[in-house]
Amino acid sequence: MSKIAIMGAMPEEIDPIIATLHDLRKTEYADNTYYEGSYKGQQVVLAYSKIGKVFAALTATILIEKFGCEKLLFSGVAGAISEELKIGDLIIADGLCQHDLDITAFGHPYGYVPEGDVCIWADSALRESARQVARSKGLTLKEGIIATGDQFVADKARKAWIGETFKADALEMEGAAVAVVCNALDVPFFILRAISDSADMDAGFDFDAFLVSSAKTSAAFILAMVEKIK
Ligand code: ADE
């Protein structure tokens, strides 16, 4: 049976999932801890990467290349850009882009480097499974572009610029890095986020207040996804 990788960026994002696993085994590798176990008979490998694009790319690569995971699901929290998204709401990425990637000095669009793409699309079958899970649980699931950058956004103007430039609905700090790795290695991936803040002047306060509860909301949905796709 194929193994599924489940990734978060912070302990709060994967601890609720680790707590449900059977036959848990820990491996220390590349300055991080990887957790292998089973959920309802499905083999899974979990890790939190630490925050940001570089750590996220490293962890996604290791989950695929060292642990042999054939699908990757990301669970975590995000800042809302869309007015529709409130704290605790779920969004899945249809596409992911890097809002802090800028070689516009050479005439390229924001988020683009030669031989890359501004936007990388998440796996359509996994997104369809997510819609079915949401329907069966009576949950509202928004789909949209998620913008990633090595920046905690707590500023209305920056948030508005990211929203306009990338048509993004939410922002975070890892998704597009995972997308680049999975796309290059041809591994289907899925990025889910529950909103922890609105990336405005209250974002730092809201993030601290809602990280744990929103991370749990995302984790519960990811577990339902694992059950659905196993
Ligand atoms: N993740 C959750 N909230 C965020 C924010 N405001 N900026 C960047 N990443 C986030």
Image (tube, grey):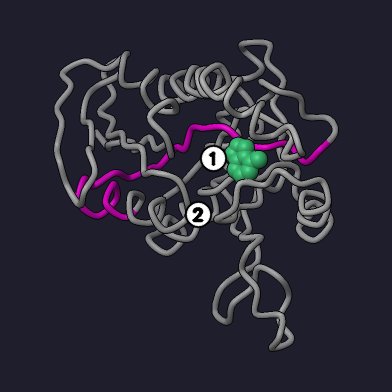
Residue 195 in view of the camera:
no
Residue 75 within the magenta-colored segment of the rendering: yes
Residue 190 within the magenta-colored segment of the rendering: no
| Residue 73 image label | none
x and y, in percent, of residue 110 in the image: 71, 71
x and y, in percent, of residue 46 in the image: 31, 33
Q: Which residue lies furthest to the bottom in this view?
A: 106
Quadrant of the rendered image containing residue 202: top right
In the depicted structure, whether residue 169 falls above or below residue 227: below
Could you tell me the amino acid type at mark 2?
Ala
Say whether disc 1 or disc 2 marks the residue closer to the N-terminus.
Answer: 2
Residue 56 in view of the camera:
yes
Q: Which residue is drawn at 31% across and 15% down?
A: 19
In the depicted structure, whether residue 19 falls above or below residue 61: above
Q: Give the left or right position of residue 215, taking residue 105 as reference.
A: left
Q: Nearer the viewer, residue 161 or 65?
A: 161
Quadrant of the rendered image containing residue 105: bottom right
Disc 1/disc 2 C-alpha distance (Å): 9 Å
**Which class describes the residues within 10 Å of circle 2: few (<14), some (14-19), or many (20+)?**
many
The yes-or-no answer for disc 1 within 8 Å of ligand 1 is: no
Q: What stretch is highlighted in magenta?
A: 61-82
Give the residue number, with chain letter if any, for mark 2: 179
Q: Give the left or right position of residue 36, taking residue 202 as reference.
A: left
x and y, in percent, of residue 39 in the image: 30, 18
Q: Which residue is drawn at 55% across and 16% down?
A: 213
Q: Quadrant of the N terminus?
A: top left
Residue at disc 1, secondary structure: strand
Give the residue number, with chain letter if any, for mark 1: 191
Quadrant of the rendered image containing residue 162: bottom right
Quarter of the image where ligand 1 sits = top right
Residues under numbered marks 1 and 2 in contact, where contact means CB atoms less than 8 Å apart: yes
